[in-house]
C-alpha cells in the first residue's frame, strides 16, 4: 500500500508540481490550500506525512503544524518556507516539524527526504513492495525493468515501458496528454500530442486481451488516460 501524503500549499502551481513528482514516486497524494482544510483532512483521512507551507492564508503553517502535532503525533511533517532564515527553521522544528526545505527546491531532494523520514518512522514501503508493482494480471519488476502478463513477458519499447510504469505507480489517476508528454518525453519535446495516442494504442495491443475494449488503460474522453485498478 502506498504511503499517503498531504500537500498544504496555497499556490496551485506549486501544489500541482509537488503532486506530480510525488505521484510519479509512488505516493498517494492529497491536497489542501489552507491550514483549516488541512486540519479537516487530518480528521477524516489516515496520513503518513504532510508537506506544509509556512505562508498560508488564515491559519499559518506554524499554527497548523502545532495543531497537527498535538492531535496527530504520528504524522510526519516537512515544512516549506520561501525565507532562507535560520529562525524560520528553528521555529518550525520547535513546533514539531521533522524537517524543512527552502523554496525553490529540487523535487528529487524532497522525495529523498520524504523517504528518509518515513523509514525513520517505520512507515516506509518495504524494498520488495517498492520493486514489484501488481495490477490484475499485470506485474512490473523495477529491478529487471520487465513487465509480465501472468507468466508471459511483454516486449515493450522504452516509451511503452515508461508509460506503463507511470500508470502502475498511479492506478486510477487520470493524466492529460500534455502531462504524459511532459513526464515521458520531457518538457522540451515539441512533437505532436498525437504521439501519446499512438503509443497508447500500441501499448494496448500488447497489454489488453481486447485492445478495442480495454480492461486496463482507459480513455478519459476530452481529458486523457488512466490505468484502472484491477
Image (cartoon, rainbow, N blue to C red):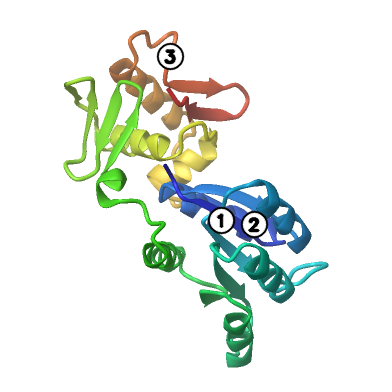
Give the Cα separation between the discs numbered 2 and 3: 33 Å
Q: Is residue 86 above or below residue 109?
A: below
Residue drawn at x 61%, y 80% as measured from the top left: 92
Q: Which residue is found at the position 65% from the left and 60% from the top?
A: 8
Q: Disc 3 or 1, which lies upstream in sequence? A: 1
Q: Is residue 59 left or right of residue 72?
A: right
Image quadrant where one finds the C terminus = top left
Q: Is residue 218 above or below residue 189?
A: above
Which residue is situated farthest in the right direction here?
A: 58
Within-10-Å neighbours for mark 1: few <14, some 14–19, many 20+: few
Q: Mark 3 sits on what residue?
A: 214
In this orientation, does residue 190 appear?
Answer: no
First along the sequence among labels 2 and 3: 2
Viewer-closest of 33 and 50 = 50
**Label 3 – label 1 distance at C-alpha:** 30 Å
Image coordinates of residue 60 in percent, x first then y, are 75, 72
- Residue lying at 39% horizontally and 43% vertically, measured from the top left: 184
The residue indicated by pointer 2 is 13
Q: In terms of image quadrants, where is residue 163?
A: top left
Residue 89: horizontal and vertical position, in percent? Answer: 58, 85
Instruction: Report helix, strand or loop for mark 1.
Output: helix
Report the residue marked by disc 1: 17
- Decide: is 43 above or below 213: below
Q: Secondary structure at mark 3?
A: loop
Give the farthest residue toward the bottom: 86
Quadrant of residue 156 within the rendered picture: top left
Whether the residues at callouts 1 and 2 have beta carbons within 8 Å, the answer is: yes
Give the side of residue 8 with respect to residue 201, left or right.
Answer: right
> Cβ–Cβ below 8 Å for labels 3 and 1?
no
Residue 186 point in image, percent of width and height? 41, 49
Which SS class for mark 2?
helix
Q: Residue at x 70, y 61 (%)?
A: 11
Amino acid at each position: 500500500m502506498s504511503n499517503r501524503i498531504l500537500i498544504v500549499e496555497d499556490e496551485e502551481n506549486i501544489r500541482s508540481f509537488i503532486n506530480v513528482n510525488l505521484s510519479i514516486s509512488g505516493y498517494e497524494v492529497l491536497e489542501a490550500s489552507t491550514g483549516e482544510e488541512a486540519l479537516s483532512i487530518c480528521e477524516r483521512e489516515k496520513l503518513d506525512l504532510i508537506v506544509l507551507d509556512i505562508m498560508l492564508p488564515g491559519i499559518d503553517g506554524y499554527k497548523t503544524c502545532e495543531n497537527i502535532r498535538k492531535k496527530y503525533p504520528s504524522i510526519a511533517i516537512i515544512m516549506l518556507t520561501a525565507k532562507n532564515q535560520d529562525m524560520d527553521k528553528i521555529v518550525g522544528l520547535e513546533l514539531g516539524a521533522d524537517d524543512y526545505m527552502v523554496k525553490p527546491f529540487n523535487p528529487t531532494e524532497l522525495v529523498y527526504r520524504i523517504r528518509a523520514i518515513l523509514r525513520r518512522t517505520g512507515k516506509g514501503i518495504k524494498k520488495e513492495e517498492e520493486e514489484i508493482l501488481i495490477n490484475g494480471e499485470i506485474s512490473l519488476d523495477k529491478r529487471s525493468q520487465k513487465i509480465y502478463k501472468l507468466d508471459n513477458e511483454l516486449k515493450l519499447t522504452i516509451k511503452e515501458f515508461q508509460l506503463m510504469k507511470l500508470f502502475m505507480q498511479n492506478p486510477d489517476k487520470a493524466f492529460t496528454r500534455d502531462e504524459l508528454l511532459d513526464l515521458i518525453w520531457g518538457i522540451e519535446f515539441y512533437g505532436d500530442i498525437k504521439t501519446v495516442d499512438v503509443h497508447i494504442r500500441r501499448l494496448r495491443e500488447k497489454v489488453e486481451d481486447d485492445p478495442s475494449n480495454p480492461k486496463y488503460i482507459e480513455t478519459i474522453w476530452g481529458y486523457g488516460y488512466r490505468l484502472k485498478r484491477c
